Image (cartoon, helix red, strand yellow):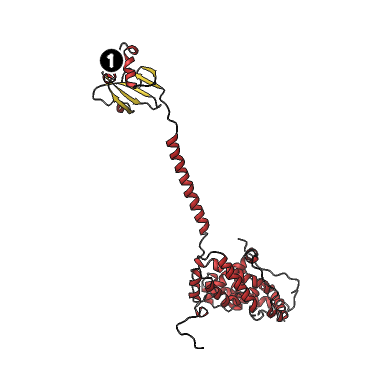
Amino acid sequence: MASDPYRTEVGDLSDRVLWEQARKGDGSAFGVLFERHAGRIYNYYFRRTADWALAEDLTSTAFLLAWRSRGRAPLQAESALPLLFGIATNVLRNQRRSRRRGREAFARLPLERAEEPDFAEDASTRLDDEAAMRQLLRLFARLPRREQDVVALCDWSGLSYEDTALALDIPIGTVRSRLARGRRRLRELASTSGPEGDVDVVPLRIEVNEQ
Amino acid sequence: MSAPITPPPERDFPAGRLQQRKEQLVSRIYGGTAAPARHHPRRILVLAAAFAVAGVLAAAGYAGYKLTRPVTPVVTIGCYESDSLEANTAVLAAGSGSPVAKCAGIYASAFPNAQRPASFAACLLPSGSVGVFPRDAGSETCKNLGLSDLHRTSADQSRTK
């Protein structure tokens, strides 16, 4: 079937257009943004928490907060990703409180966890991922929080310096210097640590900003 | 041997769960407000409305008080011998009738040594009572004493009533 050249699918619209529509109250436009970027945020959260289930909850929370703050958050880039990663990082800082809030927000909408055949198929792989990520986070948690954010966004999530600067609302020069320090520290920590360690008994450390 | 510093590869958001989460999000969105979120707009509106209501109530209360408050009755009239607040004074019960006429009626008996003035001025004293003073023709007695003029009349006119 030939496509109508005069018709633009919502999914074809740019992030900027979708965001502007969302700012006007269009929830379906925001839904498209969610579909488009949830995967990136989900993986970012997994790499910060080593917990796929928590990453899923946090992703929903971050997008809900993005919707609520859309009125005072114009897009500074063509992509919504810097903004979403910035919100996601703030959510992480307030992880305990935000998770509780997120659970309350979604508590009235029961999730049908039984229908997860695709998740069950690679459950074993994901468990291995969690174990490996916990081991890495054990080192990572020893970096200053500011360096953690920059390394996680630039190196683990593939954001450019410019987008990382937008996400964290810091100058690009600061991104570069924090990234260099963070990488160096992480290499040093890795070189002085064994590959095994006490992975299974070390609790995940996430800095929580209680303010 | 060193510990790995590269995280595991990215995984897809499980497809079915992505759709579920999206539906939840959109439901949540439409369950709330459709207007762009602003800085606590509801709280600001509620506060503004509360202040407005409080202002209206205060204005209405003040107006009601002013309109319905009991009028302090004038219970006494001070008849002054001369146009001075320091002069000898005869105090009369207010009752009915013109204060000027009452003072004119008792002036000769109250102040036998004084010459009966041609006219009187009735002024409002700071206490709320009425003070009646001898008045020279053409003078503004109340104003000169720093009082407001209750009304101006002459003893002769009141005698004719």
Q: Provide the residue designation for mark 1.
A: B116
Nearer-the-camera pick, A162 or B95: B95
**Parent chain of label 1:** B
Q: Residue at x 42, y 30 (%)?
A: B71
Nearer-the-camera pick, A29 or A130: A29
- In the shown orientation, is residue A92 left or right of residue B142? right
- Tell me the amino acid under the disc marked 1: Arg
State which quarter of the image contains the C terminus of chain A. Answer: bottom right
Relative height, residue A13 to residue B37 (above, below):
below
Nearer-the-camera pick, B115 or A23: A23
Q: Residue at x 55, y 66 (%)?
A: A68
- In the shown orientation, is residue A188 left or right of residue B39? right
Nearer-the-camera pick, A64 or B87: A64
- In the shown orientation, is residue A2 left or right of residue B116? right
Residue A78 percent coordinates (x, y): 49, 76
Q: Which residue is drawn at 45% across and 42% down?
A: B60
Residue A128 percent coordinates (x, y): 72, 79
Residue B84 visible in the shown view? no
- In the shown orientation, is residue B124 left or right of residue A126? left
Q: Quadrant of residue B20?
A: bottom right
Would you call the spot at circle 1 few (<14 residues within 10 Å), some (14-19), or many (20 or more)? Answer: some
Q: Quadrant of residue B147?
A: top left
Residue A207 percent coordinates (x, y): 65, 66
Residue A72 percent coordinates (x, y): 50, 66
Relative height, residue A102 to residue A18 (above, below):
above
